[in-house]
Image (spheres, helix red, strand yellow):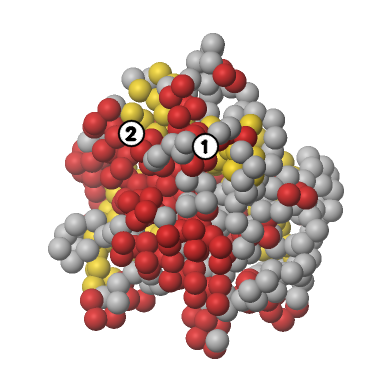
Amino acid sequence: MSNELQDFLKLSYAELEELNLKAKEQRTKRIPLEQIREERLEYLLSEKRIKAVTVLFSDLEGRLHMLDYDKKFLIKSWDNLTFDGSSIRGFTAQRESDLRLGIDWGAFYWAPADIFGAGKVLVFGEVIDKDGAAYSGDLRAVLKAYAKTVYERERLTLNAANEIEGFLFRGVDAERHYAETGKFEYVNTGGYYHSLPGDALRQFIDSAAEVQRAMGFENEKDHPEVAPSQFEINYSYAEVVAAADQIQIYKLICRQVATKMGLTASFLPKPVVGVNGSGMHTNVSISKNGKNLFWDAKGLEKMSPYAWKFVDRILTHGNDICLALNASVNAYRRLDPHFEAPNQIKASATDRGSMVRIPIGNERSARVEVRSVGPDSNPYMVLYTVFRTGIEGEIAKVKNLRSADRYLPDNIYDALADFRKAQWTTTLLGEDVKRRYAELKQASADRCARLLGTVVKAPEVQFHHEIYNQFLWNQF
C-alpha cells in the first residue's frame, strides 16, 4: 500500500537517541511523575505526526504484551484503559476478568520507524486491579514499589545491568517450527568474538546495536558469543526498573530485527545440546547518595562487608529462588557443568561455575554478578528476587557457605519442589502469586518429558512460555 499521503513521525537515529537519553535522565533524577505526565501529554497533543501509542506490559511469566491505542483516544482516556485479564496466562480468572492499565509516563520511548513502524511511540503500562491498587501479578509494579520503598526508607538506589545472550537461527519463527523440523540451523559457526563483517550474525548484531543505541541504552560492547550463532550486546547500568524494562525492549528489538532479516532471535537457555547455552548474567549494585555500597578497597576481593552479606543471603536461598531465575523446562539443560554452567551454589571471583561471581571492579563498578539466570525468565521477578533476597533474606549458619559443596536443581521438578516448600518465596510473592506461578510452571513441565535426556524435545520448545501460541497450547 502506498504511504505517500501519510505524514507519520520518522526521526533519525541521532534524534531518537537524544530524546530517549533525556527521558532516561528524568527517570534517573526522579522527576515527579505529574510533571513528566503533563510534559508527555503536551507532546502527544502537539506532535501531529504520531498516530498511536504502544502500551507494553508483562504477564506473570515475563512474556511481553503490547496494545496499540489511538493517540487521540489515549490523550482523553489514559486514566481509564481497561482490558480482559482472564486472557493473559497467570492473571485473573474469567469470573473476575476486568483489569486496567495505568501509564508509567517516565518509561516512555521513541522507537525507530524502520523497525517499529512510523508514527508510534512506546510506553510501559502498570496493571491495576479492580480496587485501584497495583495488581499483585504484575511483577513490574511489585519491583517498582520495592525500589521506591528502599529508597524512601534508606535512600538506597538499586542498580542493574544484564548481559543477555541469545542465538540467531535461520528462518522466521524457527522456534514455532521446531516441532516440525526437530532442529535449529545456525547462521554462523565462528564462535567467540569471531564473525566476518558482512555475515548474517554480524549484520544482525550491528543492526540491533544501532536500534538499542537510538533507544537510549548507552551501549558498551557487542560480539558473537562462545557457541555458534550466539550473540551478546552489552549496555550500561540503569536504575532497577529501567534496567528490567530494557531487558524486555532488548529482546523485542532482537526479535524484530531478526524477523526483518528472515531469521529468528531465540532466547531459549539451551536450544542446542552440545554447545554453550545462553544466560542472562545479572550484575547488581546498591548506591546511597551516589556512593557504591558494595565497594571497599580493603575488603575481601575489594568488596564491602555489606556486599558480602548480600551475597551470603543469595547463596542461602539459592535453591529457594532457582525457579524464579530459571523459569522453563529448557533452562535446566543450561545448568550443565560441562559448559561453564553456573550451577554451584557458591561465590567466586574466578570460577565461572559459581552461582555468584565477584567481577574485578573499582569504586564505580564494584558489583555482584548472579550468573544462574536464564534469558527467558521474567526480568522483573528476577531483579525483585535478587535485590530483596540480598537485602532482607536470611544467612544460613553453614560452614564455608561461600564455597560449600551444594548445587542448583538440574530439573524443573526439583526446582518446583524447592520453590513451593520455601517460606522465603511466600514472603517474596505472597501465597496467591506464588501458587499461580508454580501452577504455570507445573503445567509446562507436565507437557514435557520428565527426564531431559540428551536431545531437546519438541514440547519443551512448543510449550515454552515465550514461544507458545494459543492454538498449540489448546491442542495438547
Q: Is residue 115 shown to the viewer in this render?
A: no
In the foreground, 220 or 466: 466
Q: Considering the image in quadrants, where does the C terminus appear?
A: bottom right
Using the image, determine if residue 367 lies above or below residue 109.
above
Q: CA distance from mark 2 to mark 1?
A: 44 Å
Residue tagged 2: 26
Q: Is residue 403 shown to the viewer in this render?
A: yes
Query: Seen in the image, is 233 located left or right of residue 366?
Result: right
Q: Residue 80: x percent and y percent?
A: 19, 63
Give amino acid for label 2: Gln
Name which residue lies at 43% across and 71% down: 439
Labels 2 and 1: the sequence-earlier one: 2
Element at badge 2? helix
Q: Residue 44: x percent and y percent?
A: 29, 50
Query: Seen in the image, is 418 located left or right of residue 206?
Result: left
Residue tagged 1: 398
- Circle 1 crowding by C-alpha within 10 Å: few under 14, some 14–19, many from 20: few
